Amino acid sequence: MSDIFPEPAPDFSDPLGLIRACHQRMLSHCELLEKLAAHLRHSGADDDARKAARQAHRYFSTSAVFHHQDEEEDLFPRIGRSSMAMADTVHRLRQDHRTLDEAWADLGPMLENIAHVGDTERFAQLVAQYCDAYREHIRIEEREFLDRAQHMLSSDELRKIGKAMQERRRPKTGGGDR
């Protein structure tokens, strides 16, 4: 029955649930990238490829960026000081973010100009590296960080994190008072 009526997505009142849900969307978009790489090899940059490229690019250049900021600015600082083990995990996760950002610097422009990707094998390699790195990052974050964070953060800290996440996504207005 959950297939017919899926559970509602977590909201900002459940920031760790929102982070977990984002991980699932990241994994889904990685699958989309992998399908795109295979499609590009066999069918070229047709309408389906361009649509998939736009969708993946939009997600990884907006939502995934917010996700990393949520962790870097609001979650990691609160947890990283709790123990040496958590400090090591946070350090690893921050390194992963830098690695993912570097990989995106190569992959993102290719997605923006998917019709001009000449070396589809190279594109497929970049996609595989990017998606493998994301999967490993998410695995570590889910197993070694989020479960512990859930027990370490007070309801007040979680509320503050959720509020900061919501504010980060609020459209910026040009001047004037709100």
Image (spheres, rainbow, N blue to C red):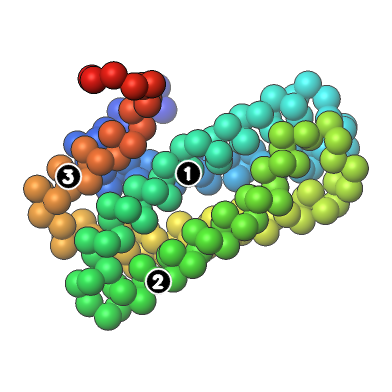
Relative image position of residue 87 (x, y in whole percent): 31, 74
Q: Is residue 153 above or below residue 28?
A: below
Secondary structure of residue under mark 2: helix
Relative image position of residue 94 (x, y in whole percent): 44, 64
How packed is label 1: few (under 14 Cα within 10 Å), some, or many (20 or more)?
few
Residue located 67% across and 43% down the image: 108
Task: Name which of mark 2 and mark 3 comes first in the sequence.
Answer: 2
- Residue assigned mark 1: 65
Q: CA distance from mark 2 to mark 3?
A: 22 Å
Residue located 55% across and 39% down the image: 61
Task: Name which of mark 1 and mark 3 comes first in the sequence.
Answer: 1
Question: Where, by quadrant of the figure, is residue 72 drawn?
Answer: bottom left
How packed is label 2: few (under 14 Cα within 10 Å), some, or many (20 or more)?
some
- Residue assigned mark 2: 91
Q: Quadrant of the C terminus?
A: top left
Secondary structure of residue under mark 3: helix
Q: Amino acid at mark 2?
A: His
Q: Is residue 10 visible?
A: no
Q: Amino acid at mark 1?
A: Val
Q: Amino acid at mark 3?
A: Lys
Q: CA distance from mark 1 to mark 2?
A: 18 Å
Question: Where, by quadrant of the figure, is residue 9 drawn?
Answer: top left
Q: Is residue 172 above or below residue 18?
A: above
Secondary structure of residue under mark 1: helix
- Residue assigned mark 3: 160
